[in-house]
């Protein structure tokens, strides 16, 4: 795995917030994503470029915060991803253009806000981190 440093991380105000999030939304986040959030909540990675199956040079701006009082927190965007009362995708980061980087069926995708289409990125969160470059 590549060495990624995270800047501007904001510690979780409630250590059980991820567990509570999972219970409230009847989901289970992958362990690698949970650990990253626990240590780097709202952080910006030093390696911030990645490619999708359709686009080269996309960027990750920052992880969404799991602190409800923070700007750009996951709770502000969840309703955009609900269908029939269930989360279809779980947004966990934003790119520099306001698109969401999401977990969908354990795959990582980018959801383009203007077209509401997705681009495939990786088969897992760990694989996504391994794809990041300067």
Image: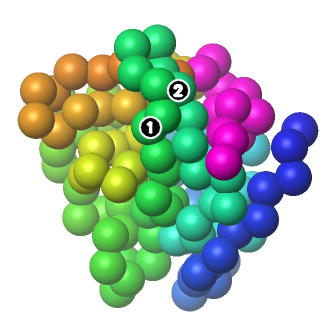
Magenta run includes residue 77: no
In the rendered structure, which segment of residues is drawn in magenta?
122-134
The circle drawn on residue 67 is: none
Magenta run includes residue 125: yes
Image coordinates of residue 20 in percent, x first then y, are 51, 63
* Residue found 35% across the figure and 86% down from its top: 69
* Residue found 79% across the figure and 56% down from its top: 4
* Residue found 23% across the figure and 33% down from its top: 112
Q: Secondary structure at mark 2?
A: loop
- For residue 130, what is the image quadrant? top right
Q: Secondary structure at mark 1?
A: strand
Compared across the picture, whether 114 is left or right of 70 comes to left
| Residue position for label 2 | 51
Compared across the picture, whether 110 is left or right of 131 comes to left
| Residue position for label 1 | 58
* Residue found 46% across the figure and 69% down from its top: 65
Label 2: few (<14), some or many (≥20) within 10 Å?
some
Depth check, front residue: 115 or 86: 115
Does residue 19 show up?
A: yes
Image coordinates of residue 2 in percent, x first then y, are 86, 43
- For residue 111, what is the image quadrant? top left
| Farthest-out residue, top | 53
Q: CA distance from mark 1 to mark 2?
A: 6 Å
Depth check, front residue: 73 or 49: 49
| Mark 1 in CB contact with mark 2 (< 8 angstroms) | yes
Give the quadrant of the N terminus. Answer: top right
Numbered label tally = 2
Compared across the picture, whether 111 is left or right of 65 comes to left
Image coordinates of residue 21 in percent, x first then y, are 47, 58
97, above or below 16, in the image: above
């Amino acid at each position: 795995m590549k060495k990624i440093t995270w800047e501007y991380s904001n510690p979780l105000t409630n250590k059980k917030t991820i567990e509570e999030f999972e219970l409230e939304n009847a989901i289970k986040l992958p362990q690698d994503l949970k650990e990253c959030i626990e240590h780097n909540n709202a952080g910006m990675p030093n390696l911030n470029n990645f490619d999708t199956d359709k686009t080269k040079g996309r960027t990750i701006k920052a992880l969404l915060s799991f602190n409800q009082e923070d700007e750009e927190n996951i709770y502000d965007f969840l309703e955009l991803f609900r269908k029939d009362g269930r989360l279809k995708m779980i947004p966990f980061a934003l790119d520099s253009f306001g698109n969401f980087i999401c977990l969908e069926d354990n795959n990582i995708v980018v959801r383009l806000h203007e077209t509401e289409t997705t681009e495939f990125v990786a088969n897992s969160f760990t694989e996504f981190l391994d794809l990041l470059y300067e």
